[in-house]
Amino acid sequence: MPSNTNTFSYQAEQSQKTHDFFATKLACETDCSDVYADIKADNKNYILLDVRSTEAFNKSHVITAESMPHSDINDESFAKYDEDTLFVVYCWGPGCNGASRAALKISALGFVVKEMIGGIHYWEDFERYPVNRRLTEVQR
């Protein structure tokens, strides 16, 4: 394998280690396309959580999402969910770690969770998938 390129300056390998890395990555993530396909197919086997602030949620959010700011995730706020409830979380986008923080908290509470990579930024701005929107005083 060539080692005189920037891309392969660190040796790539075909190994169980590489396979395990990508299997783990996919076990922890999903993307906007998969979530939207589930919405269109009316698959309701998980709860989609927008973990941004309530104000951000009110401006624009994925059409089936529920609001739960990551700072509000705790034993009390999750007591209402059955232990086998599945979650997908999202935040602003790749430059934000709010969804990762939320997923860490949710998994620590014993729930299965995935992060929707790209967040609302990819959902709304790149994919142009439908959102719920509300005008606020600031936007008028």
Image (cartoon, rainbow, N blue to C red):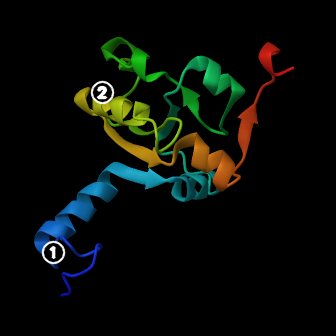
The residue drawn where x is 29% and y is 73% is 7
33 displayed left or right of 83: right
The residue drawn where x is 31% and y is 15% is 75
Q: In this rendering, does residue 4 appear at all?
A: yes
Residue positioned most to the front: 4
The residue drawn where x is 24% and y is 76% is 8
Place of residue 89 in the rendered image (x, y in percent of width and height, measured from the top left): 45, 37
Q: In this rendering, does residue 136 appear at all?
A: no
User: Residue 12 is drawn in which quadrant?
Assistant: bottom left
Q: Are marks 2 and 1 in contact (CB under 8 Å)?
A: no
**What amino acid type is highlighted by mark number 1?**
Gln
The residue drawn where x is 55% and y is 20% is 53
Front residue (pair 74, 69): 69
Place of residue 81 in the rendered image (x, y in percent of width and height, measured from the top left): 40, 25
State the quadrant of the N terminus: bottom left
SS assignment at label 2: helix
Place of residue 24 in the rendered image (x, y in percent of width and height, measured from the top left): 24, 56
Residue tagged 2: 105
Viewer-nearest of discs 2 and 1 = 1
Residue tagged 1: 11
What distance separates the C-alpha of mark 2 from that of mark 1?
Answer: 35 Å
Front residue (pair 5, 75): 5
Place of residue 116 in the rendered image (x, y in percent of width and height, measured from the top left): 46, 46
Q: How many marks?
A: 2
116 displayed left or right of 83: right
Residue positioned most to the right: 140
Seen in the picture, residue 121 relative to 79 is either above or below; the reply is below
Residue positioned most to the bottom: 1
Task: Characterize the local packing of mark 2: few (<14), some (14-19) or many (20 or more) Cα atoms within 10 angstroms.
Answer: some
